[in-house]
Image: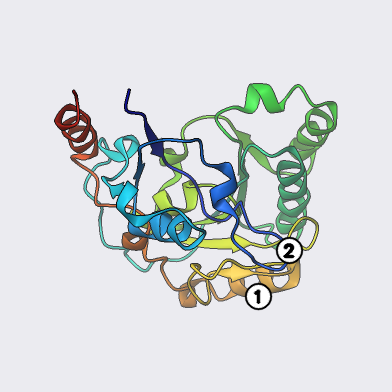
Amino acid sequence: ISVWKLWYFNPARDYDLAGNRDYIKHLPVCDSYIFWSDATRDAVVESGLPFARTVVLGNPRYDEFVKRKEPSGGALTTIVLAPSIFIDEALDFCEVAARLKEQFSHKAVIVKVHPRYREMYQDARLLNRIALLAQQGVQVCTDEAHNYYRDDNLFICRSTTVGIEAAYFGVKVITYISPFYDVYVPDWLEPGTYAFSFDELVDKINEFKKIPLLRWERYYYPPGRATARVKEFLLARQH
């Protein structure tokens, strides 16, 4: 029996504090591994996976994306923080959101929680912290992230693919490497698109128009046929 792994992961997660890749320890034993982009495949191949057992086919998740528009170069209106499923990261982003609202009271500040927020909300610490956000003028949203993919918005992310999706639509993205839970910036991030501290984050927001666009092409194929490519790949290998 042949086994394939459809491997769509974010290469920000599996670094140790020295910045050493160790992706291969997370791999199940399979005949072939399907990646969504050259960047994700290269990261795992560098950690020891044989190149011959890999193929890049794109991500079916993105097949329904509408055609992107070039950014208009407008002014910033909304700051969107999009934490991943990790509880500590979500808690930290709640604190950052409250502080950003104090700094940028004239801007809308939104915490866009992870789609699995119902599981996250089982954590009393996060429930209590989110309840406080409304009192601090921060909006908490549970709808789809693509509702906020406008180029007058700024996305602040860490270990989530939402940032790459936003970049595809011409939205500027900052990866916030909080000292609370990380000390390393993965080398695939674009210079100028990450911040190590809250003060650095504020400085970048103040210079919104100077933030470079993340080169989304490095992270996944243009959307449209990934589902078909995966199907064709699997059918061609049936015995």
Q: Earlier in the sequence, mark 1 or mark 2?
A: 2
* Residue beneath the point at 36% across and 69% down: 73
SS for dot 1: helix
Q: Is residue 151 visible?
A: no
Q: Residue at x 41, y 68 (%)?
A: 213
The answer to which image quadrant residue 113 occupies is top right
Seen from the viewer's position, the closer of residues 85 and 228 is 228
Task: Kindly identify the residue that appears in the image at 78 percent across and 50 percent down.
Answer: 95
**Residue that appears at 65% across and 21% down:** 118
Determine the CA span between mark 1 and mark 2: 25 Å
Q: Which residue carries the number 1 mark?
A: 203
Residue 109 is situated, as x and y percent measured from the top left of the image, at: 63, 49
Q: Amino acid at mark 1?
A: Asp
Residue 226, given in percent of the width and then of the height, sits at 23, 39
Residue 162's label in the rendered image is none
Q: Nearer the viewer, residue 163 or 151?
A: 163
In the rendered image, the vertical position of residue 210 relative to residue 118, given as above or below: below
Q: Is residue 188 left or right of residue 34?
A: right
On-image quarter of the N terminus: top left
The scheme the figure's colours follow is rainbow
- Residue 234 visible in the snapshot: yes
Q: Is residue 168 left or right of residue 157?
A: left
Q: Nearer the viewer, residue 167 or 204?
A: 167
Q: Position of residue 170 (x, y in %)?
A: 35, 59
Q: Nearer the viewer, residue 32 or 104?
A: 32
- Crowding at dot 2, Cα within 10 Å, few <14 / some 14-19 / many 20+, comes out as few
Quickly name the residue at label 2: 17
152 relative to 205 in the view: left or right: left
Q: Viewer-nearest of labels 1 and 2?
A: 2
The image position of residue 65, as x and y in percent, is 28, 40
Q: Provide the secondary structure element on which disc 2 rests.
A: loop
